[in-house]
Amino acid sequence: MANAKATHKVGQKPATDSASRNGTVRTESETPTENKVENEAEKAAPQTLNQDTALVQLLLTSIRPYWRMMSLAALLMLAVASLNVVPPYLLQQAIDGPIAQGNVQALWRITLLYGAAALALFVLTFAYTYFLQYAAQRALADLRTRLFDHILRQDYTFLTNTSTGDLVARLSSDIDNINQVLSSSIVVILVEGVTFVVLITVMLATNWRLALLAMVLMPLLVMVTRYFRQRIRLSSSGERSAMARISSFLNEHLHGMTVVQLFSHEEESEQEFDDYNSRYRNALINLRYHSAVFLAVQEVLAAIGVGLLLYGGGRGVLAGWATLGMLVAFFQYSQRAFQPILNLSQQYNSIQIALGAAERIYRMLQTEPRIQSPAQPIPLETVRGDIEFRNVYFSYLPDEPVLRGVNLQIAARQSVAVVGATGAGKSSLASLLARYYDPSQGQVLLDGIDLRQLSLDDLRQAVVVVPQDPVCIAGTIRQNICLYDADISDDTLFKAAEFSNAARFIEKLPEGYDFHLLPGGANLSQGQRQLLALARALAHSPNAVLVLDEATSSIDTATEALIQEALERILRSRTSMVIAHRLSTVRGADRIIVMERGQIIEDGNHEELLALDGYYARLHHHQVLPKTAYPV
């Protein structure tokens, strides 16, 4: 019986185990799950940046290529803000001049000027809106592309620790929230802000007594604004968090709806969704409540201000230090002075939401992938396929080692199968060879070169992984194999399909290679998707090292035979590592590696390991015994 702490290689004296680390072994998936309190982006990104700075930096970096157009739009907005004081001034001049004097000719001139000012406001408003929207939408499209490209470059750890709902939210709703700021809030802030300053200046220059009457409540309005600002921000943060949880829940359940229905879990799922929905509803009601109270208080203050102006200004007209036209103009000045504050306050909700969105996007953009190409990679011109694991230790979490001092050499064109119990570390070997992760200690070498010294592009061409659950995209069979790579010819495509046995089912489909797949390949069987993944690997990297991770774990016997036949051809032509539970798929391998608790405990071919009568022999006996006990 093989010792769990010794590596038995047939024909050699058992070697003692190198020092191992204490800890538990992970589950078979051997990848971190998504049930983290914080996602990878939140933990890895810098924590010193506040929301305001994040929004400013995102906006500045996004609009920098379009600064000329944005500058032109800003100048036009300033012109609009300045013109906003013209209509009340013309109204004052008309009342105190032509109307008081009965001069109809002069009244026509003022009327024409009033119409010209209104027309100018219309033209300038249209112009700045067009230029701003054009630049803003291009900037946001660039930001969306930049964020998507950044996600594409992320490592396996980031992608497994960050939920799909979070990624979709960053690319969709968070970008839309920033769009609201660029296309609307900035316009309001600039136009209304400049309008407010110009109005106050004109009011003070026209009649300082009336100006003070009009502004007497503004300090109170500022205090109210500051009071509600923090409450709206907190409510907005709660609303966005609740919405993110709903998005994540919907994404998971819509993808796993079949499982929910098969296990009659509809009622529980409905209850869980109702809980998330109720939290979001309460958060939204809380946000709307604070916003509504804020706006109502401002409206009341504005009305009180108009009343004070009416009383004080009316007495001023009677006393002679103000004219009737001036008082009428100040009513419009006052309304327009309060309106910017009201409009600016209405933007708080959008701005607070955008601040949170900008912070999340900024942190994600600041999260650099842990697995990157070196600054000066060693070129890999040809791939022989020599692989070596040299004293490799690896763990996903501190103090939880998955691999413990693994030493393994695989010669070029040798096929090696890796078997073992759940959590033994089999998939971790494949993940390290594909450089989804880097070892905690030791080295993984390809043709004598540490994988960390190779560019990721070269490595991805040199090592191809066919996962247990292959991914299919919505599109044709041809597009799924070629992945839109124009360099893959039809001849290469057909050869890959033939060599992998995928052509046998493809040619039976209604449109052959132009048959359209549903998202995720839902209209193909698991085995057909696996054959498609094999064809894809051969088409893109015909000479690469091939890693098969549980390729036949969940397919029918007939399809397994097709895959097995294809593998016998494929594995003879290249270096390969096959992770498997079914021993029927590994009997023909040149070597079989048996792992237990992160260590290699047996090494040999099928017959040699059976003769050793160790772990592999027991595993083989366990899988074969039911077939002999219950013959067909």
Image (cartoon, rainbow, N blue to C red):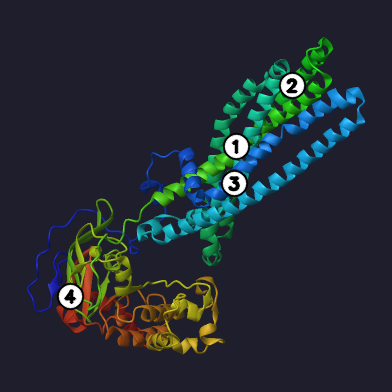
- The residue identified by callout 4 is 603
User: Of marks 2 and 3, which one's residue comes earlier in the chain?
Assistant: 3
Residue type at the position of mark 3: Leu
What count of labels does the image hold?
A: 4
Q: In which image quadrant can residue 160 be found?
A: bottom left
User: Of marks 4 and 2, which one's residue comes earlier in the chain?
Assistant: 2
Q: Does 207 sit above or below residue 534?
A: above
Disc 1 crowd, CA 10 A, few/some/many (<14, 14-19, 20+): some
Q: Residue 348, which numbered label?
A: 1
Disc 2 crowd, CA 10 A, few/some/many (<14, 14-19, 20+): few
- The residue identified by callout 2 is 304
**Separation of marks 1 and 4 at Cα, in angstroms:** 67 Å
In depth, the one of 27 and 519 nearer the eye is: 519
Question: Which callout, 2 or 3, points to the residue nearer the camera?
Answer: 3
Could you tell me if residue 155 is visible in this image?
yes
Q: On the rendered image, what quadrant is the N terminus found in?
A: bottom left
User: Of marks 3 and 1, which one's residue comes earlier in the chain?
Assistant: 3
Side (left or right) of 596 relative to 277: left
- Residue 29: where, in percent of width, then height? 35, 63
